[in-house]
Image (cartoon, helix red, strand yellow):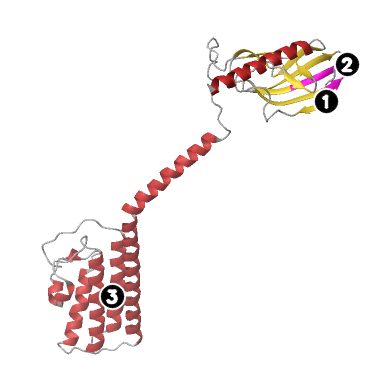
Amino acid sequence: MRHDKHSDSRRVALCLLCLISSLAYADLKLISAEFLPAVFSAGMRVQVFARLELGSGFLPEGTLKPVNGVFGGTEPSIHAISLKKDGKYFLYTVAFTSWEPGQGELPPLPAGTEILPAISIMTASSLNEDASLPPPRAQREPEGVRLRVYFFVGMVLLAVSAGVFSVLALPKIASSFFARRTVKRTRKLFFRLLAELEKNAGSGPDSWLRLCSALRGYLGFRLESEAPTWQLPIPLAALTAREFSRLPCDSLPGSVHGEFAAILLRADTVRWAGRIDENILQAVRDIRRAVEKLETALSEKQLEIPVSSGGCQ
């Protein structure tokens, strides 16, 4: 029952408002109305500029304030109203939003002692079923975007290639680098020993022992670093001078087997047979020359292990 009483009260108030507006319209006439934008759809904020002709009545100028915070009802929603004297006319400006498509109106609103007239509005539907969609336009690419994409893809591929390379090839390269560095330092130490023996050469067994020990150590290291390309059947340290001389002539790269074997045999004659007329300076020069030939042959990266069944002739 309470709800019905409120509905009846609203109906009575609306009838009274229409009656008052019909009486007031005799002195207040709507001349024209322009909408901005001219065509609008539901949900858009719109302004209407209306010209009113006032007879003997009176209208206040300025911005009207809503009653209880609301202008009229909820459809359409009225945001602001202003009145301004323009010659013999009044400029009536309303900002509103229509929420329902189709024919509608801005309701009559009180302004001082007068009632502003209603204004008819036509709200277009935001969904126009008759309109056909325009054909899609070609997408415009920013200038230089392809170049940047190609550059990015190239960098990604380069990073992937670098990662694969570092995983597969880098360990081998690092191992080869450190191996060459170790060979270079060992060779430097060996030649330093040869230079020391040349400077402080003696013909005794001790000098020959140092020379042969250094030669065996250097040859063993170089053959081990080049394994399995060049590898003796028995470690060099386990061979006597005579056993080493009986190896095939091509057991060492560069055909230097005979030269090293001759030096080792000469050292044995000094150490065990007591021979003192052997010239160690000449032996040092012979070793240096043979080592140069050996290194040259190893640097040429011979890949096949020579096979021979006989000793040196």
Lateral position of residue 232 relative to residue 170, left or right? left
> How far across and how far down the image is residue 208, in percent?
24, 84
Q: Quadrant of the C terminus?
A: bottom left
Residue 138, picture quadrant: top right
Asked if residue 137 shows in the view, the reply is no
Residue 56 lies within the magenta run: no
Q: In the image as oriented, which residue stretches furthest toward the front?
A: 1
Residue on which disc 1 sits: 61
* Between 101 and 211, the one nearer to me in the picture: 101
The magenta stretch is: 84-93
Residue on which disc 2 sits: 88
Lateral position of residue 97 relative to residue 287, left or right? right
Between the C-alphas of marks 1 and 3, the distance is 121 Å
In the image, which disc is placed on residue 287?
Answer: 3
- Residue shown at the point (20%, 70%) measured from the top left: 258
Note whether 150 is above or below 304 in the view shown: above
- Residue shown at the point (30%, 59%) measured from the top left: 300
Reading the chain from its start, which is encountered first: label 3 or label 2?
2
Q: Are the two marked residues, 2 and 1, in contact with CB atoms closer than 8 angstroms?
A: no
Which class describes the residues within 10 Å of circle 3: few (<14), some (14-19), or many (20+)? many
Q: Are the two marked residues, 3 and 2, in contact with CB atoms closer than 8 angstroms?
A: no
- Residue shown at the point (58%, 19%) measured from the top left: 7
Report the predominant secondary structure element of the magenta stretch.
Answer: strand
* Between 274 and 235, the one nearer to me in the picture: 235
For label 2, the SS is: loop
Lateral position of residue 200 relative to residue 245, left or right? right
Q: Are the two marked residues, 1 and 3, in contact with CB atoms closer than 8 angstroms?
A: no
Asked if residue 149 shows in the view, the reply is yes
